[in-house]
Amino acid sequence: MWEIYAYQNADSLFGIFNAAAAIHGSGDYMAAVAAVAFCGFIAALVAYAFAPEKLQGWKWLATVLLVFSVLIVPRVTVGVVDKTGGSAVKVVANVPFGVAFLGSVTSTVGHTLTGLFESYRAGQAL
């Protein structure tokens, strides 16, 4: 489980991650992704028809597929940890990996820096 540390906004973050899980899990989202992929493929074919030497469509297609299959397709569980209140960890399932990874890394860095600052200030007060 990926942990997201929250200071005074755990309910908002829970709602955001819950919305991201709902959007990425709906059939409408996959239909939109399919439509965008189809339009991109048609645009690449038209561009290739007019200037085949300038188009590097296969590299573009491989990059899009790699990013989509690594950041969007895998689903993970996220736990929103409220550091200021006494509430329990709020768990959200089926969050896309890229969203969970970015949120976890940024909140962990902030949480670590906050802990270091508080321990430094506590040492100075003595």
Image (cartoon, grey):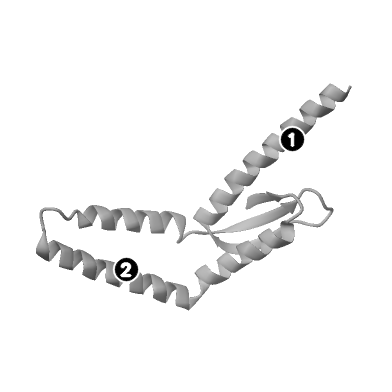
Residue at the spot of label 2: 37
Q: How many marks?
A: 2
Decide if residue 34 is on the left or right side of residue 105. Answer: left
Decide if residue 39 is on the left or right side of residue 84. Answer: left
The x and y percentages for residue 22 are 57, 71
Q: Residues within 10 Å of mark 1 (few under 14, many from 20)?
A: few
Q: Is residue 71 above or below residue 115?
A: below
Q: Residues within 10 Å of mark 2 (few under 14, many from 20)?
A: some
Helix, strand, or loop for circle 2?
A: helix
Identify the disc placed on residue 124.
none
Residue at the spot of label 1: 115
Helix, strand, or loop for circle 1?
A: helix
Q: Residue furthest right?
A: 126
The x and y percentages for residue 124 are 83, 22
Picture quarter containing residue 92? bottom right
Identify the amino acid type marked 1. Gly
Decide if residue 16 is on the left or right side of residue 123. Answer: left
The x and y percentages for residue 7 are 74, 49
Measuring 34% from the left and 70% from the top, which residue is drawn there?
36
Measuring 61% from the left and 62% from the top, which residue is drawn there?
17
The x and y percentages for residue 14 are 68, 62
C-beta proximity under 8 Å, tags 1 and 2:
no
Q: Nearer the viewer, residue 53 or 99?
A: 53
